Image (spheres, helix red, strand yellow):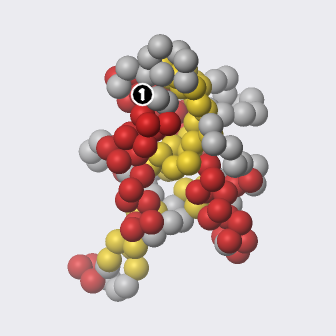
Amino acid sequence: MKSRQFTGVAGVHFVASRLNFLCFHAVPTTRNVGGPDLLVSSPDGFQSLTIQVKTTRLALRTRGGRGKEKKTYELQWDVGPKSRKLNNPNLWFAFVDLKEFQGIPDIYFVPSKVVFAYFYHRSWSRFRYHPLLAEVERYKNENGWKRLKKALK
């Protein structure tokens, strides 16, 4: 059984566990209730932010031929009609690529203003966030954690 809900829950808990490992307070919110997926605060509790988690089993997309001729091109996540309109300095998106758990999943921490601008300028993309690899590399894993840490200081 490959349920989207289970994929989403896996992403939320994966992000929360990584944040807890880095000594941040990260608490998942109640599922199926509007609002963010995670509430996060600094270790002393004085700085906080919210995270909207978007998870996919496999985000990487290729183009340009078959076999070895294929080149990695972009990543893709479903965002939904409500999330694409969110723009708040205290809201971040965690885009999780589970990579079918063939290795450690990748997390891209992207400020909501970046996601909002993406959809504002691309009305044709509807509810899928599909940035080019070069566009999101600065938000991937360690780069993203550094940005998030800075926002919580």
Q: Residue at x 52, y 33 (%)?
A: 12
Quarter occupied by residue 63: bottom left
**Res 125 visible:** yes
Residue at 71% of width from left, 66% of height from top?
120
x 46%, y 29%: residue? 153
Query: In x, y percent, where is residue 92?
Result: 57, 42
Q: Please say if 46 is above or below 125.
A: above
Up-down relation of residue 121 to residue 69 (above or below): above
Where in the figure is residue 133, as x and y percent of width and height?
40, 66
Q: Is residue 22 left or right of residue 4?
A: left
Residue 44 % position (x, y): 47, 13
Name the foreground residue: 82 vs 47.
47
Q: Is residue 106 visible?
A: no
The local secondary structure at tag 1 comes to: helix
The residue type indicated by label 1 comes to Leu
- Label 1: few (<14), some (14–19) or many (≥20) C-alpha neighbours in 10 Å: many
Please, which residue is most extreme toward the top here? 44
Image quadrant assignment for residue 68? bottom left
Residue 22, how many percent across, how many down?
35, 25
Q: Residue at x 35, y 71 (%)?
A: 72
Residue pointed to by mark 1: 19
Report the front residue among 13 and 25. Answer: 25
